[in-house]
Image (cartoon, rainbow, N blue to C red):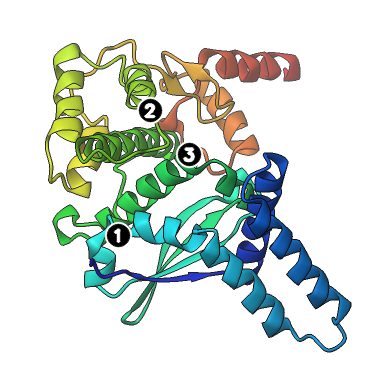
């Protein structure tokens, strides 16, 4: 029998997942005896609520949480990550109130390390998606814990400005997701992400890179492991050493729209345009450039002003 990591569940998470699971069984006419017993015992608790303390309600829901094999579900997924046991990692599953706040995060306090995984409780009704989501998120955390990955929370994304930083971050995320999904597939474990959809995203984001450069990056993250965080970041950054098509799109640092060329020449009368832009965007630097549309906007303002 494999050792299990320490898993804890939020009380509201337990209560809601049990309620949704029982309701789904009832809707489909399954496990009728269990469903009836749940309602009877729950009603008795509420009828004697004046004498019933919170711990009795928690014990009631925890009992059904185990009987419905909900706890076993999470334990079975966690068993695929032996590093959690080896490094004495605490897993905490809590309720999320929306899709955007779902995910797993690693918290470190001294020698204590906790993985907090936030989930919408309705996810319990789709075990296939939930299993894929947990495998993917926990693989990412497992990478962060793996010394071979050399994870650095403060690693530079090598952007020379905010726009480049954001583009490098997007590329890095796609590469990491591709690496995770390819390894999960190799281990015959699920992911909620599709390798085909990720590959399409990769082709779009890296589409302006020369084919041989693009292919080398893809092969590195999909077929080669271990790969360090630094290698992925280096593969994401569009430095001078990287051969990139001149048609590569960038975001204008002022309007944030995509452009294929930024104006960075501020000689002669263009200096006034540069000065006007800095009045509106104090954090903007002339070296960052601006798209032709923004340039024409500020130049027309200058003409009107004169």
Residue 281 numbered mark, or none: none
The spot of residue 195 in percent (x, y) is 32, 26
Q: Nearer the viewer, residue 181 or 215?
A: 181
- Disc 3 crowd rating (10 Å Cα; few below 14, some 14-19, many 20+) is some
Provide the secondary structure element on which disc 2 rests: loop
Give the distance between the C-alpha atoms of the residues marked 1 and 3, in whole angstroms: 18 Å
Q: Residue at x 14, y 15 (%)?
A: 212
Q: Are marks 2 and 1 in contact (CB under 8 Å)?
A: no
The spot of residue 114 in percent (x, y) is 40, 71
The spot of residue 41 in percent (x, y) is 74, 71
Q: Nearer the viewer, residue 156 or 288?
A: 156
Q: Residue furthest front?
A: 33
Residue 147 shows up from this direction: yes
Q: Residue at x 84, y 74 (%)?
A: 46
Q: Is residue 73 left or right of residue 232?
A: right
Give the distance between the C-alpha atoms of the residues marked 2 and 3, in whole angstroms: 11 Å
- If you read the primary sequence from the N terminus, does the residue marked by circle 2 or circle 3 appear first? 3
- If you read the primary sequence from the N terminus, does the residue marked by circle 2 or circle 1 appear first? 1
Where is 290 relative to 193, above or below?
A: above
- Disc 1 crowd rating (10 Å Cα; few below 14, some 14-19, many 20+) is some
Q: Residue at x 29, y 75 (%)?
A: 88
Q: Which residue is mark 2?
A: 194
| Mark in front: 2 vs 3 | 3
Residue 267 shows up from this direction: no
Give the distance between the C-alpha atoms of the residues marked 2 and 1, in whole angstroms: 23 Å
- Disc 2 crowd rating (10 Å Cα; few below 14, some 14-19, many 20+) is some
Q: Which residue is mark 1?
A: 79
Q: Which residue is mark 3?
A: 129
Give residue 223's quadrant in the image.
Answer: top left
Q: Is residue 57 left or right of residue 137?
A: right
Q: Quadrant of the C terminus?
A: top right
């Amino acid at each position: 029998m494999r050792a299990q990591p320490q898993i804890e569940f939020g009380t509201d998470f337990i209560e809601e997942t049990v309620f949704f699971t029982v309701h789904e069984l009832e809707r489909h006419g399954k496990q009728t005896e269990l469903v009836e017993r749940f309602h009877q015992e729950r009603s008795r608790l509420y009828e004697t609520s004046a004498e019933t303390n919170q711990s009795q309600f928690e014990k009631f829901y925890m009992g059904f949480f185990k009987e419905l094999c909900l706890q076993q579900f999470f334990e079975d997924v966690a068993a695929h990550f032996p590093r959690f046991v080896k490094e004495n990692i605490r897993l905490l599953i809590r309720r999320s109130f929306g899709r955007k706040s779902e995910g797993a995060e690693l918290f470190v306090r001294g020698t204590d390390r906790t993985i907090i995984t936030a989930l919408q409780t309705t996810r319990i009704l789709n075990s296939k998606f939930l299993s894929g989501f947990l495998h993917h998120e926990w693989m990412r955390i497992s990478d962060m814990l793996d010394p071979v990955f050399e994870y650095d929370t403060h690693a530079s994304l090598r952007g020379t400005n905010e726009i480049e930083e954001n583009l490098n971050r997007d590329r890095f995320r796609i590469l990491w997701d591709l690496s995770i999904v390819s390894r999960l597939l190799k281990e015959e474990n699920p992911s909620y992400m599709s390798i085909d959809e990720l590959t399409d995203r990769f082709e779009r984001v890296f589409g302006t890179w020369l084919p041989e450069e693009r292919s080398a990056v893809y092969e590195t993250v999909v077929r080669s492991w271990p790969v360090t965080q630094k290698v992925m970041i280096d593969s994401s950054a569009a430095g001078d050493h990287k051969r990139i098509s001149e048609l590569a799109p960038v975001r204008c640092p002022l309007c944030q729209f995509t452009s294929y060329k930024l104006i960075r020449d501020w000689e002669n009368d263009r200096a006034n345009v540069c000065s006007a832009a800095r009045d509106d965007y104090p954090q903007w630097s002339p070296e960052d450039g601006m798209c032709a549309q923004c340039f024409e906007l500020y130049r027309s303002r200058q003409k009107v002003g004169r």
